Image: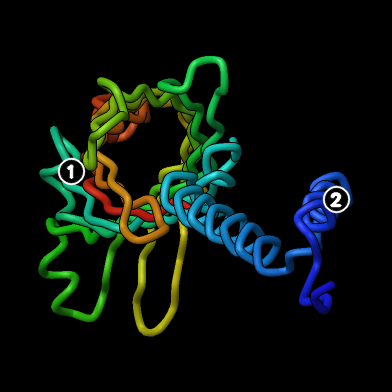
Amino acid sequence: MPPHSGPTRTTRRRAGHLRSCGPAPHQPGAFMHLSSSIIRILTAGCSVVSVVAPSPARAQDKSRTLFAALTVGASQPFGDFAERVGTGLRVGVAGLLKIRRTPRLSIRADIGYAGFDNETFVLAAQSGVRFQTIVLGGSVSGLLHVGSASGRTVRPYLVGGLGVSNVKTVTIANSERLESPGEFAPGINAGAGIEWRLFRVETFMEARLEAIFTNAEGGSGTQYLPIVVGVRF
């Protein structure tokens, strides 16, 4: 009988049968490959979301309804008021309330100061006397955006409302300042403007005619056109 040189054919078949029926061997390489694939997919998904989704600041801007604003510019007088004063300075603060149900419509409350130098008192000015007309008032207006906001960098709007102002005359002579009590009177305003986004700040420019029904100037009232630029935040 020849010496045993290895497993017989029957033994090899039984061993192969046992290997096929037994549990699969642990393969750490496949698990690592699957994990790396999942990580790559999640990383790519996060990158897409970060590009497509709005930033937290933009999302917060869209959810906000209340804003503040600062304005500065020049005021051009009209009518009989323009015969007595020259172009003046205008500064103001405002609060804007956006209406969610009507995104194109907002409500704005303004407090403004306008100062004008009187031009008819030239001789008095040469003698060291200075006269000014000061207008301090507040108004509540409606602001209506024109057209759709999608895909537009510059957005026009219309604005108009009602207000109350105090118009008084100031006399400055020999370092003394004398102010008249002033006159409180109602007024109306109407105008238009444009707004655009500069970095993260809403910037706007507008011209709005203001008519105050004072008894000065022979009952013609006080009329002027402020042209201002402002920032909203």
Q: Residue at x 18, y 73 (%)?
A: 125
In primary-sequence order, the first of circles 2 and 1 is: 2
Residue 167: image x %, image y %? 41, 44
For the N terminus, the quadrant is bottom right
Mark 1: few/some/many CA within 10 Å (<14, 14-19, 20+): many
Left or right: 218 in relation to 171 = left
Residue 136: image x %, image y %? 45, 48
Disc number lying in front (2 or 1): 2
Extreme bottom residue here?
A: 175
Q: Amino acid at mark 2?
A: Arg
What residue did someone put label 2 on?
Answer: 14
Image colouring: rainbow
The mark tally for this picture is: 2
Distance from label 2 to label 1 (Cα)? 109 Å
Residue 224: image x %, image y %? 23, 39
Extreme front residue here?
A: 1
What residue did someone put label 1 on?
Answer: 77
Q: Secondary structure at mark 2?
A: helix
Q: Secondary structure at mark 1?
A: strand
Left or right: 61 in relation to 128 = right
The vertical placement of 206 against 212, above or below, is below
Determine the image quadrant of residue 146.
top left
